[in-house]
Image (cartoon, coloured by chain):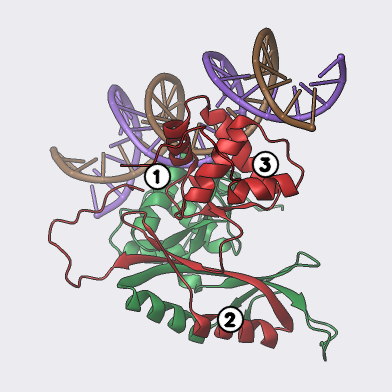
Chain colours: A green, B red, C brown, D purple
Amino acid sequence: MGRTREHSAITTEMSRIERMCVERGLKMTGQRRLIARVLSESDDHPDVEELYRRALALDSRVSVATVYRTVRLLEEKGILERRDFGGGRARYDPADRGHHHHLIDVDSGRVIEFSDAAHDAVAREIARRLGYETVQMRLEIFGRRLPESAPAGAKPGRRSV
Amino acid sequence: MGRTREHSAITTEMSRIERMCVERGLKMTGQRRLIARVLSESDDHPDVEELYRRALALDSRVSVATVYRTVRLLEEKGILERRDFGGGRARYDPADRGHHHHLIDVDSGRVIEFSDAAHDAVAREIARRLGYETVQMRLEIFGRRLPESAPAGAKPGRRSV
DNA sequence: GTATCTGCAAAGTTTTTGCAGGTCG
DNA sequence: CGACCTGCAAAAACTTTGCAGATAC
């Protein structure tokens, strides 16, 4: 919580997202740098409201309108992906984190994130056969724990299968 | 445009969705019957606006508010599934239709339904590897039309259907 | 310098809700 | 009859936009 206020101090380092912005020739303003940093430091799927809150905590010189404008810009540039998890708000996910899907335990409600290149290839091939190039995809599996040799201490977290 | 106009004639038959409502003990009003019928006769994924339009064409004694209230009710009862295909509007899909996935054209908003046994097998195998038995799954592919025999004048619009 | 960006607030969209009257069971 | 439903319009929730001043390159 207690994020120190370094403000616009000796920020020698460029955030991961900012680097992508620069690579794409975007004009970098203080606000964009700020939002890029917030995005780089987030490993969840924040909505605009949440991004705005996190940005404000670092520097008050930013408005919601700018957050909206920036995420839209970054989405157009392929830096962010917009996700619709329901709930009426768009949520954002840096595109360089790779796709991940969700396995939802129907009994406990727990969500396991995973990624699977083979699956994605299959899905992309389906799209191609239908005449489409895949821009984004979302797979949600609802499942029930197998009673088998279940490893006892299974921990939540991203997994590659 | 030639939607058959049986109107409120000798509607001896109960629509598919209406039957599901009755089975769940819902009070059936004229509006709910109407909306149930529209849903039963639709084989796409209409949003509320579109449902309202189709309902109005059959009987003018219905309001958007009631359509919103009804789809929410039917969703809670498991009769409808709410889909987020982007475009800002929720779209609805009767839950009793067979298992299928969706390919969403990000430019036109059009939705293509498909099913693919090979894909489902892959997904089931992923779940099994994670220690889960698949109960249900949902795949949504967002794609852009491949420049095959594409006519030159296709402009990416905000959305259509 | 100049094209672009930003904050503010007002306007747009989509969905929900308060209320008075109407309907189902 | 009593509980619930509906229409209407106003409100809420989320996102976009017009404009004047500020800023990056």
- Disc nearest the viewer among 1 and 2: 2
Q: Secondary structure at mark 1?
A: helix
The residue at which mark 1 appears reads as A69
Q: Residues within 10 Å of mark 1 (few under 14, many from 20)?
A: few
The one nearer the camera, B17 or B88, is: B17
Residue B42 place in picture, x, y as percent: 47, 50
Whether B25 is drawn above or below A111: the answer is above
Q: Residues within 10 Å of mark 3 (few under 14, many from 20)?
A: some
Residue B32 place in picture, x, y as percent: 61, 36
The image quarter in which residue B36 lies: top right
Contact (CB < 8 A) between labels 3 and 2?
no
Q: Quadrant of the N terminus of chain B?
A: top left
Residue A1 place in picture, x, y as percent: 72, 53
Residue at 56%, 69% (x, y): give it: B99
Contact (CB < 8 A) between labels 1 and 2?
no
| Left or right placement of residue A72 versus residue C25 in this view | left
Callouts 1 and 3 in the same chain: no
Residue at 60%, 37% (x, y): give it: B33
| Left or right placement of residue D12 versus residue B53 in this view | right
The residue at which mark 2 appears reads as B123
Residue at 26%, 71% (x, y): give it: B146
